[in-house]
Image (cartoon, rainbow, N blue to C red):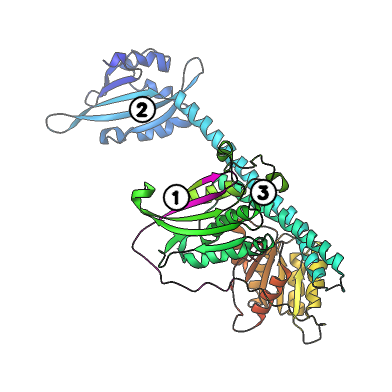
């Protein structure tokens, strides 16, 4: 039997310190005669690779305890190196004393080569992932930085910070703003798809009230619907269950579906956002599901195009669709976000009649939340009175190296009555902050020399700057960037492009008690406004 095994089977006698048996396979694997071990039992040790020999010899006493399981290399007479896995099993006599050791030594060279190749492949994949992450972060920064200047300057011009405008100029600026905002949406979608595909998105789930979620999603597309005279409605049952989900991501899903509904629904059409509970008997799941349905009276989708919809960068081929720009990422993102929640996406449609997009999210039945009144969704920050800064005006230190952003932000905030001092790198920001004792610091993260993260850390170590409010303004927009900024000492994190009205409101909150403090609102991005 042992002669048929492609491994060396061996037995030694502890009382006579000699070999009882060595299978002939030894000659094939070791490249040496097996009968040499009957003459010199430890001859096999001489063939062990010099780098592995001491470790194997030190492990030999484990054989009696049944703990010997070693991997090592041997050098054959022809110079070839082979990998061996050697195991030993003690054999007791009738009195329970170990008098023999049996073992089996396998040639595992092929397995080791495969493991090495797999490890090399994994290391290359890790390297590729790291390079892709760096590329995404750099791309995000490089694209958002000029967009910040474009949107910020446009916002300031529309508020007539730089002088009065006529109607033609105002319309032109509105076109610039819409185009820049659309470009930002495309950038965000591309980054989101890349992060989801690489498994980098982690959901921030918590119990969420459904009615405010639906109302806020409808509010986002209300103006577009009004322009096309589209009737909007929300159909919500009473006592909706409490659902544990990532509210920001599911709002993103609903807005994507509602945006599409508005885009492809002709004037005087109708769009309904309906929520219903689906029992296990209907859903085919073991748990209940909550179904969000976006129903429209739009152009509909042909059966042959249904399968294309949820593929990234795919646009259906219809005459109406060609009137609109886009990457075709919205529904791909929707599908992936819903699947991350353990849910599924469905669709029914008829050309010329309309479509119904459905997302089903599983939940545990039995827990409900009281009905809440709809949130105040239409409120915008009131326009601030434009005034010239005086000696008593708050002093802001702006740490920023991009000239366009410096011009945009400083011009706007000066018009709002703040005094502005500049720093163009982290070390200069620290020096200026110590010398000037500003009321608040606006800190860009990516700057030459010392970056903003390091500058904030050092500021927080200085007693005179330990409590000075800091707002991190950065074009970095990955999920971990907010945490990095807050851990470094920022009170707030605003990702570029920053709405200047929102920046002004955040400054007011941090400078006005009792709102003064760390982490008032978290990340505020342009798309949330």
Give the spatial CA distance, label 1 vs label 2.
46 Å
- Residue holding disc 2: 86
Eye-nearest disc, 1 or 2 = 1
| Residue 490 visible in this rendered orientation of the protein | no
Q: Position of residue 46 (x, y in %)?
A: 42, 23
Task: Tell me where residue 487 sits by quadrant.
Answer: bottom right
Q: Would you place residue 109 above or below residue 241 in this image?
A: above
Q: Position of residue 292 (x, y in %)?
A: 48, 56
Query: 10 Å neighbourhood of mark 1: few (<14), some, or many (≥20)?
Result: few
Query: 10 Å neighbourhood of mark 2: few (<14), some, or many (≥20)?
Result: many
- Residue holding disc 3: 136
Q: Position of residue 266 (x, y in %)?
A: 65, 53
The image quadrant where one finds the N terminus is: top left
- Residue holding disc 1: 342
Is 83 covered by the magenta stretch?
A: no
The answer to whether residue 153 is left or right of residue 292 is right
| Residue 183 visible in this rendered orientation of the protein | yes
In terms of secondary structure, where does tag 1 sit? loop
Give the spatial CA distance, label 2 vs label 3.
48 Å
Seen at 30% across and 20% down, the residue is: 9
Q: Nearer the viewer, residue 349 or 149?
A: 349
Disc 1, disc 2: CB below 8 Å? no
Is 355 covered by the magenta stretch?
A: yes
User: Magenta span covers which residues?
Assistant: 348-377
């Amino acid at each position: 039997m042992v002669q048929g095994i492609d491994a060396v089977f061996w037995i030694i006698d502890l009382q006579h310190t000699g070999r009882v048996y060595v299978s002939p396979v030894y000659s094939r694997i070791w490249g040496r005669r097996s009968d040499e071990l009957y003459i010199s039992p430890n001859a096999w040790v001489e063939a062990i690779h010099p780098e592995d020999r001491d470790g194997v010899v030190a492990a030999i006493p484990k054989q009696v305890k049944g703990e010997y399981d070693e991997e090592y290399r041997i050098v054959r007479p022809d110079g070839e190196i082979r990998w061996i896995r050697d195991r030993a099993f003690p054999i007791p006599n009738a009195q329970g004393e170990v008098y023999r050791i049996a073992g089996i030594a396998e040639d595992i060279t092929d397995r080791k080569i495969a493991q090495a190749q797999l490890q090399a492949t994994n290391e290359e994949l890790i390297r590729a992932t790291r390079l892709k992450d760096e590329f995404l972060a750099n791309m995000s920064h490089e694209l958002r930085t000029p967009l910040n200047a474009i949107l910020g300057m446009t916002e300031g011009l529309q508020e007539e910070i730089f002088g009065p405008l006529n109607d033609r100029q105002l319309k032109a600026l509105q076109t610039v703003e819409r185009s820049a905002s659309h470009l930002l949406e495309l950038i965000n979608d591309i980054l989101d798809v890349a992060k989801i595909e690489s498994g980098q998105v982690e959901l921030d789930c918590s119990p969420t009230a459904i009615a405010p979620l639906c109302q806020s999603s409808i509010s986002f597309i209300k103006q577009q619907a009004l322009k096309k005279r589209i009737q909007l409605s929300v159909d919500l049952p009473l006592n909706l269950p409490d659902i544990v989900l990532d509210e920001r991501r599911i709002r993103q899903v609903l807005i994507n579906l509602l945006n599409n509904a508005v885009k492809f629904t002709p004037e005087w059409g109708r769009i309904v956002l309906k929520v219903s509970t689906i029992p296990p008997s209907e859903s085919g799941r073991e748990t209940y599901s909550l179904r969000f349905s976006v129903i429209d009276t739009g152009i509909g989708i042909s059966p042959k195009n249904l399968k294309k919809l949820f593929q990234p960068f795919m646009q259906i081929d219809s005459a109406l669709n060609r009137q609109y720009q886009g990457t075709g990422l919205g529904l791909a993102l929707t599908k992936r976000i819903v699947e991350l929640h353990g849910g599924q996406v469905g669709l029914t449609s008829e050309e010329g009649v309309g479509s119904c997009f459905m997302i089903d999210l599983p939940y545990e039945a039995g827990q409900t939340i009281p009905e809440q009144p709809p949130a105040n969704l239409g409120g915008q920050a009131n326009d601030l009175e434009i005034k010239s800064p005086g000696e008593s005006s708050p002093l802001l230190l702006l740490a920023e190296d991009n000239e366009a952003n410096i011009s945009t932000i400083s011009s706007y905030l000066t018009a709002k009555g703040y005094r502005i001092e500049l720093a163009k790198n982290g070390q200069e920001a620290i020096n200026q902050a110590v010398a000037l004792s500003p009321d608040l610091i606006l800190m860009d993260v990516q700057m030459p020399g010392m970056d903003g993260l390091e500058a904030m850390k050092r500021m927080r170590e200085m007693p005179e700057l330990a409590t000075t409010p800091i707002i991190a303004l950065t074009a970095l927009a990955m999920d971990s960037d907010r945490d990095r900024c807050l851990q470094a000492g920022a009170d707030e994190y605003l990702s570029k492009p920053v709405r200047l009205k929102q920046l002004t409101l955040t400054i007011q909150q941090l400078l006005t008690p009792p709102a003064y403090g760390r982490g008032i609102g978290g990340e505020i991005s342009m798309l949330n406004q």
